[in-house]
Image: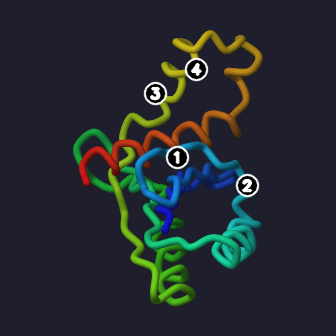
């Protein structure tokens, strides 16, 4: 079964997923947030998902960021829709910075680095990689 990670945003959401053995994290896609629940329903209908890890946005002082007011209702809906899938929050501080750094280090062009959808997908992958490393 796979673990799915979500970098939830107001407009776009990055999604990453593990292989079935839960060893490798890879970016899956970026979807418009208003279509996220439909995307998840389709994906979960095709793939066995054991756990969903949602990025928990926090400020430097550890307090929740403004985006939590959107994430909390989303997580509550997921828990009702998928009672057999464990859903948890995971600290996502610095993932956008790390995503930009990863793109720089990989030699991606300046134009490609401005693609916010790519940043969101890479951020979700970083969330999942960090989750796996602490598991």
Give the residue at mark 4. Answer: 103
The numbered mark, 1 or 2, whose residue comes first in the sequence reads 2
Q: Is residue 108 above or below residue 116?
A: above
The numbered mark, 4 or 2, whose residue comes first in the sequence reads 2
**Nearer to us in this view, 79 or 69:** 79
**Nearer to us in this view, 7 or 51:** 51
The crowd level at tag 4 (other Cα within 10 Å; few <14, some 14-19, many 20+) is some
In this rendering, which labeled residue sits more in front, label 3 or label 4?
A: 4
Q: What x and y, as percent, mark residue 98?
A: 44, 27
In this rendering, which labeled residue sits more in front, label 1 or label 3?
A: 1
User: Secondary structure under badge 3?
Assistant: helix
Q: What x and y, as percent, mark residue 76?
A: 47, 81
Label placed on residue 31 = 2
Give the Cα distance between marks 1 and 2.
Answer: 12 Å
**Nearer to us in this view, 100 or 57:** 100
The crowd level at tag 2 (other Cα within 10 Å; few <14, some 14-19, many 20+) is many
Q: What x and y, as percent, mark residue 44?
A: 63, 74
User: Secondary structure under badge 4?
Assistant: helix
Q: Is residue 38 left or right of residue 20?
A: right
Q: Residue at x 49, y 68 (%)?
A: 1
The numbered mark, 1 or 4, whose residue comes first in the sequence reads 4
The crowd level at tag 3 (other Cα within 10 Å; few <14, some 14-19, many 20+) is few
Give the residue at mark 1. Answer: 124
The numbered mark, 3 or 4, whose residue comes first in the sequence reads 3
Figure quadrant of residue 40: bottom right
The numbered mark, 1 or 3, whose residue comes first in the sequence reads 3
Give the residue at mark 3. Answer: 97
Q: What x and y, as percent, mark residue 13?
A: 64, 53
User: Secondary structure under badge 2?
Assistant: strand
């Amino acid at each position: 079964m796979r673990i799915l990670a979500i970098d939830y945003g107001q407009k776009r959401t990055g999604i990453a997923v593990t292989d079935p053995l839960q060893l490798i994290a890879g970016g899956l896609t970026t979807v418009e947030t208003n279509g996220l629940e439909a995307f998840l329903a389709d994906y979960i209908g095709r793939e066995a998902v054991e756990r969903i890890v949602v990025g928990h946005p926090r400020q430097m002082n550890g307090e929740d960021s403004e985006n939590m007011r959107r994430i909390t209702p989303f997580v509550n809906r997921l828990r009702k829709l998928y009672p057999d899938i464990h859903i948890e929050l995971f600290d996502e501080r610095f993932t956008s910075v790390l995503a930009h750094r990863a793109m720089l280090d990989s030699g991606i062009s300046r134009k490609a680095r401005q693609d916010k959808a790519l940043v969101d997908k890479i951020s979700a992958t970083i969330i999942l990689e960090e989750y796996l490393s602490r598991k």
